[in-house]
Every structure is written in structure tokens, then in C-alpha cells.
Amino acid sequence: MSSQLKWIVGFVAFVILVSVILFMNKPEVSRRGGGNSAQLVIETQTIMTQPFQIIVESYGVVAPRTQTTLFAQVSGQIVEVTDAFREGEFFEKGDVLLKIDGRDYQTLLTVSDSDLQFAKQNLEEEQARVVQAIGDWKRSGKTTPAPELALRKPQLAAARAQLSAALAKKSQAERNLERTKIIAPYAGRVLSKRVDIGQLISPSAILGEIYAVDYVEIRLPIKNKALKYIQLPESFRHQAKTGANLLVEFKSNLGGSRQSWQGKIVRTEGAIDSNTNQLYVIAQIDDPYNLSASSIANNGVPIKIGQYLEASITGKKIEQAIVIPTSTLYQGNFVFLYKDGVVKRQPVSIAWRDSQNLMIESGLEGGEQLVLTTLGEVTSGTAVRLKSEKSKTKNKRSSRKNSK
């Protein structure tokens, strides 16, 4: 026998030996009582009606309640800019923000006051002449009515007109002198500053922009499907506003720090936005720049104009609602129910949803067993075992071992 033939015979014998060993040591299938048990273990939840608070999610950008562009009403050189008139600084109503050189306007006021005194004197003299003219006409013995010129009525009217013009000129001079001081019309904050000390400005020159700080406003879009779950404040002609001021919780993540504010819906816009086809409401946050417990919770960072905020609006409370976790919904239109040892696919109609919960409009009833376990690719009618039943089986086996 050649060496090659011996190698082949040896290899075949080795394969036969390995096969015999594997056959003799094959694993035995453990057959325990209970028949063919289900391999998929699930958790369920009994469906019950419960109160459910609707929270309408929205978003918006912070805007000032009142924003004003400051214009110069007189010309001149800026001689003073106060510390309050700087970007980001606060001021109170009546504070002087900047001053324009007012010496020329003071001179004009002095001249106008002199002209006023002269006009008053001229009127008094003319009134005296009128009295004298009336007396002279009566003493002349003429029976015909005296002409107006003889009684000096045109001269008296001219003197009165001269006095009115002098008063107007003085009033104009006083206003111009007052306008050399730019005074804050309300308590606010400086948004931008366009001029500085020493600058020569003309009437209508832009000095800067300011905004009120008593409260800020946020314009929020409301989805059409949410309108029936929220009672918005509405205005009617010749009637009081209807609806309550709904509470709103605002959140932001500016600079990596989580911030929150409490606000309220104060009014509803009167038109549907043509771009989004949605209704907008206006929310406000009162006194947002006050250093209070709220700002401390926000790491001492006040709200910013133009800041993006997430809004959670408190809507209606549904007293009898079927609510299930969002994670139990499959393909957006069905869930799985457990009944008689199998799972069954059940179509549902959703009335409301948020990030965690679904409020069911139809398809589910109280007392049914909702499958909480994620099933994946499972067909309706698949046999399953409840997790609670599996735990009971393990406990029985352990008790039997202990008894032995």
C-alpha cells in the first residue's frame, strides 16, 4: 500500500471517529411539564381612564413690549452722554439720557420773552386808545354809528394777534430748549446707541434705540389641532375679553445653562398667518429683569431680546381619558394587546400626543391589557408569556428544589 493511500484511509477513519463521538454526546432536550411553552416574555399594563392635562408645546422669540427709536428734534452739538445711555444699561422714566448744547436756544427764549412783553404793552396801550376813541365819538354828538377805523378796532385786533404770535414764539423757544435734553419716556433699557459726546447732529438724526422693561412679549404659533384643547383669550367689539390668561412655562438653553420663566397668554391675534396657516397668540413675562428667585434659578442670567424660547401652555384637563405611553405605538396607527396567551394587533385613533403620552380617541377600552414590551417584527396571534407568569414559574421550581 502506497503512502498516499494510507493517508486517505487514515483521514476517513478520523472523520468517522469524530462523527461517532459527536453522535454519542448530543445534548438532550429537556421536556418539562406544561407542553410547548411560549418563548417571548412580555409586560402588560391594564388600560384605565384617568385625568389628563393637555400641554400645548410652542416656541417663540423674545420681543420688547415697546421699542422706541430716539430722534433729535433740534440741531446742535452733544455736550453730555449719561452712563445710562450705553448699550445694555437700564434707566428709569424721566432720566436724562443725553444733552445737546442749549445756549443758542436759551438766547432765543430770552428774545421771545422780550417780544412777548412788548406785545403785552402794545395791547394794553391799544385798548386804552380804543376807550378814548369811543369817548371822543360820543362827545362829537354824531348820531351815526362810528366806523371801525375810528374806534381803532383793526389796530386792537392787530395788537391781539401780535400778542398771540409772541406767546407762540416763546412757547416754541421753550420747547426747543427742553428738546436739548433727551429724557426717557418710560423705564427701559438701551438697545443701541448711535451718537456720542462732541458730535454735531441735525433734526431727525437717529440717537439710538431703547425698549421698555416692565414686561416682554413672545409671539407663539398654535397648531390647528390644538385649538379645541385650549381656551384662548378673545376680544369682541363692545364686549369684555373672554377666556382666561393661560399659564405658560418658558424654557431656554442659552449658553449651556437651562433657564425657565413663568408667563401668561394675554391676547390672540385677529388673523391667521398666511405663511404658516396657523393662529398666533401673544404671551408676556412680567418684570423679566428683576433679580428674584427666578433669575437666581437661571444662574443670574436675565432674559435677552431676540432669545429663542420653548413654551409649554397649560390647556384643558380631560377628566376621563385613555392615556398610553408613546413607546407602545407602532407605525403611528396601532398597538398590541394581550389576550388569552397571544398578542393581537389593535388599530387606534389618536386625539392628542406629546413626547411621552398618547391620548386615545378610539380603538381601546378600559380593562384591556396593553403590551408595554417592544415586540418588533411580531405578527398578530403570536403566543407569548407574561413576565409575571415566568416569575411565578421560577419561584415554584426554586421551592421544589428547596423541599428536596
Image (cartoon, helix red, strand yellow):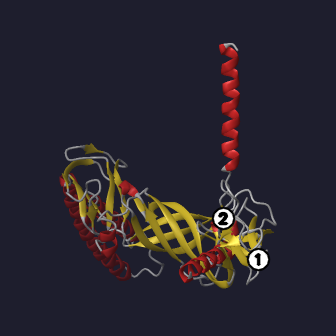
Q: Residue furthest top?
A: 2
Mark 2: which amino acid? Ala
**Quadrant of image for the C terminus:** bottom right
**Element on which disc 2 rests:** strand
Is residue 139 at least partly visible in the picture?
yes
**Quadrant of image for the N terminus:** top right
Residue 315 appears in which quarter of the rendering? bottom right
Left or right placement of residue 342 versus residue 359 in this view: right
Residue highlighted by disc 2 = 271
- Spot occupied by residue 294 in the image (x, y as percentages of width and height): 34, 73
Give the number of the disc on residue 164.
Answer: none
- Spot occupied by residue 282 in the image (x, y as percentages of width and height): 54, 68
- Cα distance in 3D space between marks 2 and 1: 38 Å
**Element on which disc 1 rests:** loop
Residue 297 appears in which quarter of the rendering? bottom left
- Spot occupied by residue 372 in the image (x, y as percentages of width and height): 65, 70
Mark 1: which amino acid? Leu
